[in-house]
Image (cartoon, grey):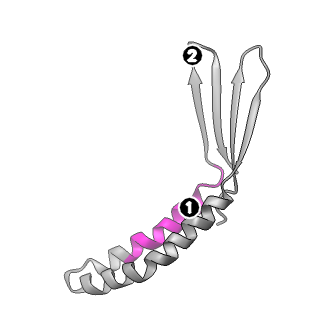
Amino acid sequence: MIPPLWLWIRVEESGKRRLALPIPIFLAWLLVGALLLLLLPLVLLAALLSWPWGWGWPLLRMYFQVFVLIGSLSGLKIDIDSHEEGKVTRLVLK
């Protein structure tokens, strides 16, 4: 699972030229990765302290599910239609 590297914003109007804006989001993943690494000791400590009450394992699973969520974003496509103005905006994560 590779996280998406580019966010493409495409704006289409009927009868006009299309506009496509690529935004590099791999730079944001570096910041998110660094933040998750900084939070890892705190999550492990919280999981260790909350283990007797049954919250340790779910806390660890939630932390690792963040990585699964980021990896699953690849290929996400969001279409936004404006029926009044005839515009179609597409957000595509590749």
Name the chief secondary structure element in magenta.
helix
Q: Amino acid at mark 2?
A: His
Please name the residue shown 64% across and 25% down the image: 88
Image coordinates for residue 73, horizontal then vertical, percent: 59, 55
The dot on residue 20 is: none
- 11 and 35: which one is in front? 35
Pointer 2 and pointer 1: residues touching (CB < 8 Å)? Answer: no
Please name the residue shown 57% across and 30% down the image: 80
Left/right of residue 29 with respect to residue 40 in the rendered view: right
Image coordinates for residue 50, horizontal then vertical, percent: 25, 82
Left/right of residue 63 with respect to residue 34 in the rendered view: left
Q: Quadrant of residue 82?
A: top right
Report the Cα–Cα distance between label 2 and label 1: 32 Å
Secondary element at image label 1: helix
Please name the residue shown 57% across and 70% down the image: 33
Please count the marks in the image. Answer: 2
Q: Is residue 72 magenta?
A: yes
User: How many other residues sit within 10 Å of disc 2, few (<14), some (14-19) or many (≥20)?
Assistant: few
Please name the residue shown 24% across and 80% down the image: 54
Image coordinates for residue 19, horizontal then vertical, percent: 75, 30
User: How many other residues sit within 10 Å of disc 1, few (<14), some (14-19) or many (≥20)?
Assistant: some
Determine which residue is flagged by label 2.
83
Range drawn in magenta: 60-75
Q: Quadrant of residue 28?
A: bottom right
Determine which residue is flagged by label 1.
70
Image coordinates for residue 63, horizontal then vertical, percent: 43, 72
Sequence order check, earlier mark of 2 and 1: 1
Q: Quadrant of the N terminus?
A: bottom right
Give the answer, above or below, for where 22 lies relative to 43: above
